[in-house]
Amino acid sequence: MEKLKTSFLPTLSVRRGAAAVDFYKQAFGAGVVFCIADPEGAVVAQLSIDGVEFLVADESPAHENFSPETLGGSTIRMGLVVTDPDALAAQAVAAGATEIYPVADQDYGYRLGRIKDPFGHHWEICRKL
Amino acid sequence: MKPKTFFAPELIIDNGITDVDFYKKAFGAVELRRFSNDDGSIHVSEMEIDGALFHLHEVTSMYNSSPFKLAGTTVIIGLFVEDVDMVMANAVEAGATVRSPAQDYEYGYRQGQIVDPHGHRWQIQKQIPIT
């Protein structure tokens, strides 16, 4: 039997989940693996960026799932290693993300820039140098 | 060669942390390199679990903060592993708290959730046949 590869599947809590799904499609070219909405419109969606999957879910403070807007900050930054960080960061900014600092060669061995998406999550778009 | 797209989550931890052995004991993580402050506490630690890269970064900016400072987390880190029960047991032994014990779910996952000593939530999981 082939050994299962260890990998991450992050779940991002947001407000306005349906709008977040649209944003990630535009910003990162994400495809929708599935998207489930409850009668109130709260969504859980699994998205895929170039085969790398993550979940986006409307926050549920009752279950201690908090959006960055609710907490006033975020506790994990989404490092995303890609072929062309300049192009992807530019695409995300065009889709409505805010640049925290531009993509540049960093002395720790990455070409990396940071953006904040409209839902409060920070992404470090990078590739190894 | 085309570098494969992948996530390398960066977990924000409190200032003054020197011991991140939890991740080694719980998940078999290997520390690849570390940037320390003058007092020996961690600025950044680069780690990998069986090839899956992640970073620990101390609180430094107004934009991001630790689970303890914010009293909550904004991301749950799903981690696919071979043996959910073994990883859960190792994590608890290493100091994690169980949030929900490992069990099979009808949507085709065996999952359990823990909170690590730095306040981050991990969902330990593997795919199983849908029954």
Image: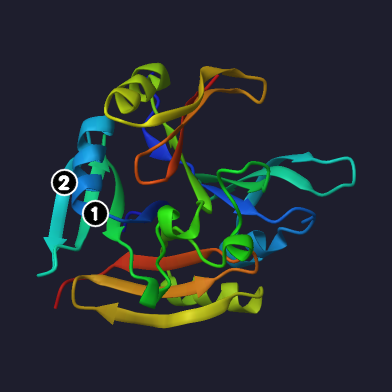
Left or right of residue B1, residue B11 in this image = right
Location of residue B77 in the rendering, given as x and y in whole percent from the top left corner: 44, 58
Q: CA distance from mark 1 to mark 2?
A: 13 Å
Instruction: Please say if B114 is above or below A4.
Output: below
Instruction: Please say if A55 is above or below A51.
Output: below
Select label 1 or label 2 by which is in front: 1
Colour setting:
rainbow
Which residue reaches farthest right? B39
Quarter occupied by residue B116: bottom right
Residue B50 visible in the current orientation: no
Location of residue B64 in the rendering, given as x and y in whole percent from the top left corner: 56, 47
Is disc 1 placed on a helix, strand or loop? helix
Residue B26 visible in the current orientation: yes
Residue at horizontal 19 percent and vertical 60 percent from the top: A43
Quarter occupied by residue A44: bottom left
Q: Nearer the viewer, residue B23 or A96?
A: A96
Q: Quadrant of the C terminus of chain B?
A: bottom left
Instruction: Please say if B123 is above or below B49.
Output: below
Residues at marks 1 and 2 on the same chain: yes
Residue at horizontal 28 percent and vertical 61 percent from the top: A58
In the picture of the structure, the residue carrying the numbered disc 1 is A17
What's the chain of the residue with tag 2?
A
Location of residue A27 in the rendering, given as x and y in whole percent from the top left corner: 27, 31
For the residue marked with disc 2, what is the amino acid? Val
Q: Quadrant of the N terminus of chain B?
A: top left
For the residue marked with disc 1, what is the amino acid? Gly
Residue at horizontal 65 percent and vertical 69 percent from the top: B117
Q: Give the label on residue A32, or none.
A: 2
Sequence order check, earlier mark of 1 and 2: 1
What's the chain of the residue with tag 1?
A
Q: Nearer the viewer, residue A5 or B56?
A: B56
Q: Are marks 1 and 2 in contact (CB under 8 Å)?
A: no
